[in-house]
Image (cartoon, rainbow, N blue to C red):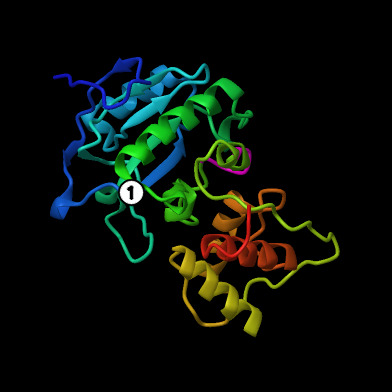
Amino acid sequence: MTFAPDSAHVSAVCSAKNTEERRCEAKPSLLILHYTGMASAAKAIDWLAREESGVSCHYVIDTDGTITQLVPECERAWHAGVSFWRGETDVNSRSIGIEIQNPGHEHGYPDFPVPQLDAVIALAKDIVQRHGIAPDGVLAHSDVAPGRKIDPGEKFDWAYLAKAGVGFWVRPVDICDEDVGLGPGDQDARVERAQRLLAEYGYNVPINGEVDEQTTKVLQAFQLHFRPARVDGRLDHSTELTLERLIQRVRGQVAA
């Protein structure tokens, strides 16, 4: 079976098997960006289209910017897996998933080329405009599945996307090499404040004032997206102040 593409930016359609109706008549309010973690886009598309894969996505973007659609946007693709954002655990029903071709951390993790990033921007702009997805609804797979997923990773250029009008970004506060921050087991009022801000943005994090295992995973996810120069899951001042800057940005209090 085939279908008409939802976006004029699509070059090809390859129907995936693992798709279904969105549950509870949910509408897309999130756009989730992944990397494929496979050697080529062709192999990723082949795998994502197969029933035995147990997964699927709406789009795959190759390194040259070519876009293939696998699932109609009106349907629920199986791309986010076990995930959470702002109280929602059925992220698949609330989102559209884009897989960006990159072999990933286990296979060299090359840079994302500009033509590919430009294609991500073009498609993402089209999607968020048609569905009314807010800038803070454009997320990494790692944001909605901290610890379980790390894609698209620290090399993905979120700042480049934001300059083009896709997603939220704030300039990270400079890292002090001597500031090792708070780590596993540490308890402090700073931790509780950071947890509250992370939860306000949407992350699944406890509010207990302790850098526990889940908090470490969420800090790593935040760093992957917003403070990629050092991803260690520790609450140093750079991470803390970048988080505060982000929340102020979301609240509309400061410019990007």
Residue 187 visible within the image: no
Q: Residue 71, located in which quarter of the rendered image?
A: top left
The amino acid sitting under disc 1 is Gly
Q: Is residue 202 above or below residue 100?
A: below
Asked whether 138 or 165 is in front, the reply is 165
Residue occupying image coordinates x 27% and y 55%: 90
Q: Is residue 203 left or right of residue 112?
A: left
Q: How many marks?
A: 1
Q: Position of residue 188 (x, y in %)?
A: 65, 83
Q: Is residue 21 left or right of residue 151?
A: left
Number of other residues with Cα within 10 Å of mark 1, as a class: few under 14, some 14 to 19, many 20 or more? some
Residue occupying image coordinates x 62% and y 43%: 154
Residue 155 is a magenta residue: yes
Q: Is residue 59 above or below residue 227?
A: above
Secondary element type, mark 1: loop
Residue occupying image coordinates x 60% and y 39%: 163
Q: Is residue 132 above or below residue 84?
A: above
Q: Position of residue 123 (x, y in %)?
A: 41, 29
Q: Quadrant of the N terminus?
A: top left
Q: Position of residue 168 (x, y in %)?
A: 54, 50
Q: Is residue 86 left or right of residue 157?
A: left
Q: Is residue 202 left or right of residue 72?
A: right
State the extent of the magenta-drawn residues as a range. 152-157
Q: Main secondary structure of the magenta part?
A: loop
Q: Which residue is mark 1?
A: 81
Residue occupying image coordinates x 55% and y 55%: 221
Q: Position of residue 136 (x, y in %)?
A: 46, 53
Residue 82 is a magenta residue: no
Residue 115 visible within the image: yes
